[in-house]
Amino acid sequence: MPEFVSKYVRSEAVKKRSVTIAGHRTSFSLEEAFWLEVKKLAQNEEISINQFIEKVDKARTGNLSSTLRVLVLKNLQEQLQTQKTSETPTDT
């Protein structure tokens, strides 16, 4: 198994998280790496984690856990693309 795979795959246990949204407790399961990124997204929006997840919950069409993972992935892809774009020299 490649070192990268063994280093990251084995250390990521799925953990059940609980939050209150719209006055009701709800649970979802996320790995720690995704949870940390979701918390960063909430901080960037300057809202609580409960408020952030409530916004996601209202907009989602599928499973909450999956939606949060895809949201994190898309955000990180966008950051990477922005970084690549800013590092690309332009012709003048």
Image (cartoon, grey):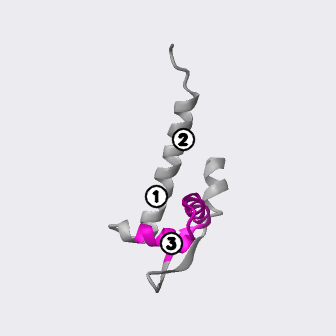
The Cα atoms of the two marked residues, 2 and 1, are separated by: 14 Å
Q: Name the residue under label 2.
A: 80
The Cα atoms of the two marked residues, 1 and 3, are separated by: 15 Å
Q: Name the residue under label 1.
A: 71
Vertical side of 12 occupied by 15: above or below: below
Q: Answer with the quarter of the image where residue 45 lies.
A: bottom right
Q: Residues within 10 Å of mark 3 (few under 14, many from 20)?
A: some
Q: Which of marks 2 and 3 is nearer the N terminus?
A: 3
Task: Check disc 2 and report its element: helix, strand or loop.
Answer: helix
Q: Earlier in the sequence, mark 1 or mark 3?
A: 3
Q: Where is residue 30 in the image (x, y as percent from the top left)?
A: 54, 69
Range covered by the magenta-colored residues:
28-57
Q: What residue type is labelled 1?
A: Leu
Q: Which amino acid does label 2 sit on?
A: Leu
Task: Check disc 1 and report its element: helix, strand or loop.
Answer: helix
Residue 23, numbered circle:
none
Main secondary structure found in the magenta portion: helix
Residue 51, numbered circle:
3
Q: Where is residue 58 in the image (x, y as percent from the top left)?
A: 37, 71
